[in-house]
Amino acid sequence: MTTTTPTPVTDGLATAAESQPAGEEIQADGVSAGTATPLGVSVSKEINPLTGLPVPDSSLLERRPVAVKITLYPRSNRPQWGLSLADIVYEYYHNNELTRLHAIFYGQNAKLAGPIRSARLPDDYLMDMYGSVMAYASADSRIQDRLHSNHPGWQLVSILEGTCPPQPVCRYDPEAFNHLLADTAEVSAYVSRNGGDNTRPDLEGMLFETARPKGGEDVERITTRYSYAAYSYWAYDAVSGRYLRHQDSWEDVGGRNEVYELLTDRLTGTAIAADNVVVLYVPHFHFVYKPAANGLPATEIVDMDFEGRGQAYAFRDGQAYAVEWVRKGDGVLTLEFEDGTPYAFKPGTTFFQVLNVGSELERDGERWRFVFDFLRP
């Protein structure tokens, strides 16, 4: 096994987006991804610019994406609702050893999405990237101040009590848990009903091709360990051509070691899967940090710098590629090879794992393990 702290993007992997043919693949939703014809985001208004795939109802693309803050913890909240229907999902460190998901719904809706929990500062950047409306439970007052200073009130759909519909977010209690869930179609309708600007934002930038780039390295398992409590891995399934998500089932303390279980969607009954997995190295820093004291946990508000560019690894079709993430202005996040050539995502869904710069990469054959590193003050 080798352990590295990633440095500028070399690693002997691909440095240019040369294509090698891949056979026709059928996505999990039954839509043919075609052959090696590139799918650019400007091909048609009926092509989802976040997946590179056609949508059955093009009117869905004439609105803002809907982002939902979905929790992974406590584990009793699993399985989540609607996560398999998101086009793009970001997982990032929240606080106190745990992570949370920022799921973006655009090309299709989820009748139920959640459980919904509170927002954090990086959501501000992600809303800018995708021009999204965000459904979330609440937030620390300092986080609320940032969100409301940068986004109009109609773009921030927080807890709404009442009956669904017409309310887009409601309590649902199937097993004595007071889950907060959203209907993403109703979130869009709520914004329009309340005078919000629910017109389609500029989402161009991501490049999609069914032919995978040349020069990749075989990797069949991608583990991300954020802490003893929050860890997961993606396993490449050659039959479907997708990555299946396996999530921690207990805390790795006291010699128990890591134990995983397949993550599924309570709404659809399917496994959580992605066509693309991307590991991003993004600078983290503390906006607030107060150490644990008097039996109370630490107070931790983490911010991140999603501006400019940084190191990344992209995974598709069982291959790994060393790339860089790029964010130009307020546009969507894209990927490039070191020479500036755009990296092509596989048409389909993408799951971004956000790590701090300096996090380690351990390689053991076709198994790669990313270990999150973030020093406390």
Image (spheres, helix red, strand yellow):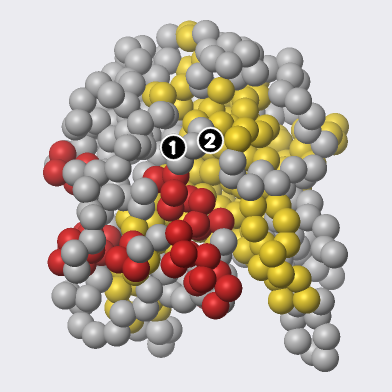
Instruction: Determine the residue positioned at 66% across, 68% down.
Output: 301
Say if mark 2 contacts mark 1, CB within 8 Å: yes
Q: Which amino acid does label 2 sit on?
A: Arg
- Quadrant of the rendering where the N terminus is positioned: top right
Total marks in image: 2
Instruction: Determine the residue positioned at 66% across, 34% down.
Output: 310
User: Between 288 and 369, which is closer to the camera in this rendering?
Assistant: 288
Q: What element carries label 2?
A: strand
Instruction: Determine the residue positioned at 71% across, 36% down.
Output: 368
Vertical placement of 158 versus 203: above or below?
Answer: below
- Quadrant of the rendering where the C terminus is positioned: bottom right
The residue indicated by pointer 2 is: 327
Separation of residues labelled 2 and 1 (CA atoms): 6 Å
Could you say which quadrant of the image residue 289 lies in? bottom right
Instruction: Determine the residue positioned at 74% across, 19% down.
Output: 10
Q: How far from the left and from the top, in percent, is residue 239?
A: 43, 30
Q: How far from the left and from the top, in percent, is residue 355?
A: 68, 47
Q: How far from the left and from the top, in percent, is residue 335?
A: 54, 28
